[in-house]
Image (cartoon, helix red, strand yellow):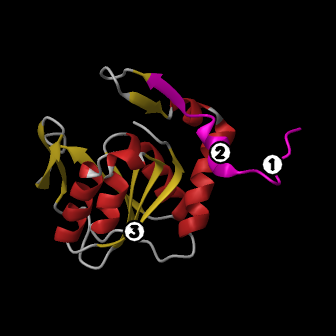
Amino acid sequence: MENLSNLDYSSYLKGWIRTVPNWPQQGVMFRDITPLLQNPKTFRMLIDIYVHRYMIEKVDLVAGLDARGFIIGSVLAYELNVGFVPIRKKGKLPFTTVEEEYELEYGNAAVEMHTDACKPGDRVILIDDLVATGGTMMAGYKLLKRMGADVLEAAAIIELPELGGAQLVRDGGLDLFTVCSYEGH
């Protein structure tokens, strides 16, 4: 039986994240979380890290960013016994939405959420799988703030510090918690 008593959770979980070179384009080292999610022990360990971090906070909602933030965020919301808010790519939600545009390396993109997804004063955790340039995370943060929510913290599994997104998020006034970090992108 594996001894988990002195486990470095960050290193252990990082060992379950697959690096795929040159995907989706040449020069990019894609960090694939699917092996971590496929293993019930590592998936539970990941969710438990977040649950233990937020269980003593008064949280009303978990907002997950499209699409891998939905996986982590919905399970976290369930475990915390709070609601879940999907923040989707533009054009995917069926009801009245509010939109926030952000810059990509080559152009712009936008995310949306329903206008009734949260109310003023709701205490929200914003979550995604990875923080690279920080554009998506900041767009989600701005949407929630525009609707009057109090975003307690942003969270992600992976931080890519060389791309500057984590610093952008923190400089934008949002606390950020990540489980592990990779040098390079």
Is there CB contact under 8 Å for labels 3 and 2?
no
Q: Amino acid at mark 3?
A: Asp
- Quarter of the picture holding the N terminus: top right
Q: Amino acid at mark 1?
A: Leu
Name the residue carrying label 3. Answer: 175
Q: Which mark lies nearer to you, 3 or 1?
A: 3
* Disc with the residue nearer the chain's start (3 vs 1): 1
Is there CB contact under 8 Å for labels 3 and 1?
no
| Region rendered in magenta | 1-20
Report if residue 123 lies within the magenta region. no
How far is disc 3 from disc 1 in space, using C-alphas? 29 Å
Q: Give the side of residue 30 with respect to residue 133, left or right.
A: right
Q: Which mark lies nearer to you, 1 or 2?
A: 2
Name the residue carrying label 1. Answer: 4
How far is disc 3 from disc 2 in space, using C-alphas? 22 Å
- Quarter of the picture holding the C terminus: top left
